[in-house]
Structure formats: structure tokens, C-alpha cells
Amino acid sequence: MARTPASPLLAETSALLLIDYQPRMYYGVEGADRTILASNVMGLAKAASILEIPTVLTSINDEGNGPFTPEIVEAFPDAQVIERSVPGFDALADEDVMRALKATGRRQVVTSGLWTSMCFSFSALHALRDGFEVFGVMDAAGSESAVAHETAIQRMVQAGVVPCTWLQTVVEWMDTWANPKAPALVEEVFRLHNGYFAQHPSRAPRPERGIASTHVRR
């Protein structure tokens, strides 16, 4: 059956590709709050680790741009950051990155990166051309201006990339509060990276009761 943009995003069929979360690349982001952006991608990464989503990390010019965000790297102890040798803006033009992505065996690619206008969008478009179903996490990305960010999003969406947010992605991966990983997601991801969950008591919802178990009593 052919997949469409309405197809569900499944943890068991997804791979995560994170591109160029490096200090100098963050510095160049304008038109977005860098602190919120960093929190969003950290929430996405920690959730992927908890849910055991195969993840590919890639950087460019580590000497000039600095190392990939250490906290993200620590979330994936079995993954190595691939510093690209191809001096371009498409991460998947690098054979090592493409090989690592294909090695996951997953056809749904969830991706985000810095900057939206270049490495993130060019890599997402490449993945589409190679037959992957691509989901772009737009609120975990930023660019050199707000216009550049929004224009790149429009280009990706017009080409077939499915736009989403980090929290939407994680919740769709989780699927239900009955997921055995739900308690860890609440404590380690939702409460630390989302204001709504941060207001609630420090305990995860019981699967049989759903989110209601986290509600503050009135």
C-alpha cells in the first residue's frame, strides 16, 4: 500500500536524522529563540533514545563550527557523530551519512537541523528523492532569518515533506498512554521540555487512566 502524508508516524518504522547542531550554527540562527530551539531538539532526541529510534547524527566542519551538542550525543551512546567530508549543504550527499541512514532499515525519516534554509531542507529533499517518507520537525530548526526559515519550510512541504513539531512527533511515536515507555517520556521529556506537563505533579500517568492521572486537583 502506498503511503501518504496522512500515514501514521510509527516508532517501529522511523529513523531520526539530526543535522549540524553545533555552537556556531546556533549562533547564526535569527528569527527564533535559540534557547527554545535547543530545548525542542533536546526533547526530541531524548524521546528517540527512550523509544529506541535508530538515530544518525552528522556535523560539518567541526574545527570551525564546534562539536555536535554534547547532551544530544550522550543520549545515543552507540551512535557516532559523522563529520561530513563532502563540503556541501546536503548531508545525504555524504556517503557515510547515507549509508548510516539506510543501515537503519527504516523508511520513515524524521529530520531536523541547522539551518532550515540549507542543510536541513536540502537533506530532507534528497531523502524524498531517494524514496523515503520524510517528516520535518520544524520547531527544532532555525535559520539565518525568520523569512529564510519559513520559506524553506514552504519549499519542503510543497515537495512532500510532512511538517510536524517535536512534541507532536514524540506523542505520535508513543501512540498511547498504555505504551510502557510513557512514564519515562513524561518524567524525562515532557515535564522538562513542555510547559503544560511541567505544571503537573512529578509522576507519570497510569496507562489505564491516561493523562487524567496527572491533572492537578482543583
Image: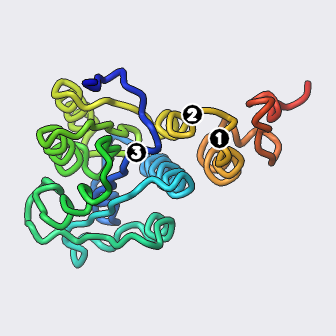
Give residue 137's position: percent from left, percent from top.
37, 40
**Residue type, label 2:** Asp
Q: How many marks?
A: 3
Q: Nearer the viewer, residue 46 or 23?
A: 46
The image shows residue 22, relative to residue 14, as above or below, that is below
Give residue 80's position: percent from left, percent from top.
34, 73
Badge 2 is on which residue?
A: 175
The image shows residue 66, relative to residue 156, as above or below, that is below
Give residue 76's position: percent from left, percent from top.
46, 67
- The residue under the point 42% across, 50% down is 34
Mark 2 touches mark 1? (CB < 8 Å): yes
Q: Secondary structure at mark 3?
A: helix
The image shows residue 153, relative to residue 203, as above or below, that is above
Disc on res. 179 = 1
Give residue 191's position: percent from left, percent from top.
68, 46
**Residue type, label 3:** Ala
Residue 151 relative to residue 5: left or right:
left
Instruction: Please tell me whether mark 3 or mark 1 is closer to you in this view.
Output: 1
The image shows residue 159, relative to residue 24, as above or below, that is above
- The residue under the point 49% across, 33% down is 168
User: Which is more N-terminal, label 1 or label 3?
Assistant: 3
Q: Secondary structure at mark 2?
A: loop
Q: Secondary structure at mark 1?
A: loop
- The residue under the point 33% across, 30% down is 163
Disc on res. 69 = none
Badge 3 is on which residue?
A: 140
Bin the neighbour count of mark 1 within 10 Å (Cα to Cα): few under 14, some 14-19, many 20 and up. few
Residues under labels 3 and 1: Cα distance?
24 Å
Mark 3 touches mark 2? (CB < 8 Å): no
Residues under labels 2 and 1: Cα distance?
7 Å
User: Which is more N-terminal, label 2 or label 3?
Assistant: 3
